[in-house]
């Protein structure tokens, strides 16, 4: 885990301590969690993304991470997903990262492939009792997965990836990584959670393969490790690399926290700097004990047992709650999602509540 910066060694790490991973220092431990906006056309970022992400940087977050950016057109959750599969998509993202940097925030991107949960209508276009799948005559596409089983009724039936297809997925992540550098990003998070492609390989609930990408946990983790190794080489040694994991499937026969500790240990050994710990998403219905900070114990277990820095997300709303997570060593980074949708300036308000210095823009100083 990263050392506490010298300036903070007289004070235990707290929510407004800097966090250094490789060559990047975040101004605080508050990150904007990836949140799908379903507002792109042909994968291109637009004014909505600039204002959505930029306002959170103005609001004081240390790290602003984009929504899941598909590494291929087939890897989109919906036709309106953000993407980074071609060079035209670089410049609109560069406009955003330049703005984030000007506000003092680090810029992160989550690279993703939706697997068998791809080619679906965005949430507000879905209707009860009707398929979530985008019809072929409305722009739907063939989805891929380690298994031929669909995610649920109304979802596309996937084509099983062969080894050539797997190699193509790895190559897509590498190409998106190189474009992430061109777009000015400081941080990459690889999406291996929430029932999307890499999670589908990791979980025995969705991986029924009998080749070298199925079977025991190490083989089910093979795709993830191949992506990590290839991305790390393209990304370089000085930039931090994170991975989002679903630490448990919350379902009998699925991934457990013990499995995820093993995976996180492998990730650390392969050059991953932080594991962003989430859970669930690989089955339509699971008995998830949702409550305030319900996923933080999972992040704490991975941090302690895998000896890797972690981020935590999930119903974290109060400044004191977030500060306690960092102070007590449960996680190194607090990622906020819905709370930052409600209040883009949550970090500035949290700093006031915790009596800490806040990165208030000069234009807003008279209000603080």
Image: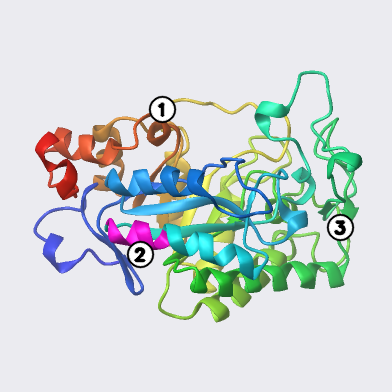
Task: Decide whether residue 66 is among the magenta residues.
Answer: no
Q: Estimate the spatial distance between the alpha carbons at disc 1 and disc 2, rounded to whole Å.
A: 25 Å
**Residue 289 on image: x %, y %:** 54, 26
Residue count near mark 1 (Cα–Cα under 10 Å), binned few <14, some 14–19, many ≥20: few
Residue at 70 percent across and 40 percent down: it is 282
Q: Is residue 182 left or right of residue 161?
A: left
Q: Estimate the spatial distance between the alpha carbons at disc 1 and disc 3, rounded to whole Å.
A: 37 Å
Q: Earlier in the sequence, mark 1 or mark 3?
A: 3
Task: Decide whether residue 102 is among the magenta residues.
Answer: yes
Please identify, in this view, whether the residue under mark 1 or under mark 2 is nearer the observer. Answer: 1
Task: Quickly name the residue at label 3.
Answer: 209
Residue count near mark 2 (Cα–Cα under 10 Å), binned few <14, some 14–19, many ≥20: some
**Residue 43 on image: x %, y %:** 65, 54
Quarter of the N terminus within the rendering: bottom left
Q: Is residue 345 left or right of residue 281?
A: left
Q: Earlier in the sequence, mark 1 or mark 2?
A: 2
Task: Quickly name the residue at label 1.
Answer: 292
Q: Estimate the spatial distance between the alpha carbons at disc 3 and disc 2, rounded to whole Å.
A: 35 Å
Say which element carries label 2. loop
The residue lying furthest to the front in this view is 47
Quarter of the C terminus within the rendering: top left
Closest to the observer: 311 or 168?
168
Chain part drawn in magenta: 97-103
Main SS of the magenta part reads: helix
Task: Quickly name the residue at label 2.
Answer: 1
Q: Are marks 1 and 2 in contact (CB under 8 Å)?
A: no
Residue at 75 percent across and 60 percent down: it is 216
């Amino acid at each position: 885990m990263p050392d506490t910066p010298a300036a903070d060694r007289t004070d235990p790490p707290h929510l407004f301590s800097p966090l250094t991973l490789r060559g990047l220092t975040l101004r605080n431990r508050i990150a904007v969690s990836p949140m799908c906006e379903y507002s792109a056309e042909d994968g291109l970022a637009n004014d909505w993304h600039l204002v959505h992400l930029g306002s959170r940087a103005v609001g004081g977050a240390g790290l602003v991470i984009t929504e899941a950016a598909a590494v291929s057109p087939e890897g989109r959750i919906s036709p309106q997903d953000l993407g980074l599969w071609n060079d035209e998509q670089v410049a609109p993202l560069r406009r955003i990262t330049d703005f984030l940097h000007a506000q003092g925030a680090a810029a992160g991107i989550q690279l993703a492939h939706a697997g068998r949960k791809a080619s679906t209508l965005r949430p507000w276009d879905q209707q009860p009792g009707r398929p979530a799948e985008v019809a072929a005559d409305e722009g739907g596409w063939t989805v891929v997965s380690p298994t031929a089983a669909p995610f649920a009724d109304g979802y596309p039936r996937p084509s099983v990836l062969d080894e050539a297809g797997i190699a193509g997925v790895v190559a897509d992540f590498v190409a998106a990584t190189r474009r992430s550098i061109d777009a000015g990003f400081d941080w990459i998070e690889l999406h291996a959670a929430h029932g999307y492609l890499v999670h589908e390989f990791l979980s025995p609930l969705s991986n029924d393969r009998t080749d070298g990408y199925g079977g025991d946990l190490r083989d089910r983790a093979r795709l993830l490790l191949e992506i990590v190794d290839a991305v790390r080489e393209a990304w370089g040694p000085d930039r931090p690399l994170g991975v989002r994991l679903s630490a448990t499937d919350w379902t009998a026969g699925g991934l457990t926290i013990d499995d995820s500790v093993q995976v996180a240990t492998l990730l650390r050994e392969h050059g991953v700097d932080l594991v962003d710990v989430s859970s669930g998403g690989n089955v339509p219905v699971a008995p998830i004990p949702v409550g305030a900070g319900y996923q933080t114990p999972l992040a704490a277990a991975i941090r302690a047992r895998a000896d890797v820095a972690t981020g935590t997300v999930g119903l974290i709303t109060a400044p004191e709650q977030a500060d306690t997570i960092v102070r007590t060593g449960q996680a190194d980074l607090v990622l906020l999602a819905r709370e930052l949708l409600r209040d883009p300036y949550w970090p500035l308000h949290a700093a006031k509540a915790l009596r800490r210095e806040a990165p208030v823009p000069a234009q807003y100083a008279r209000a603080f």
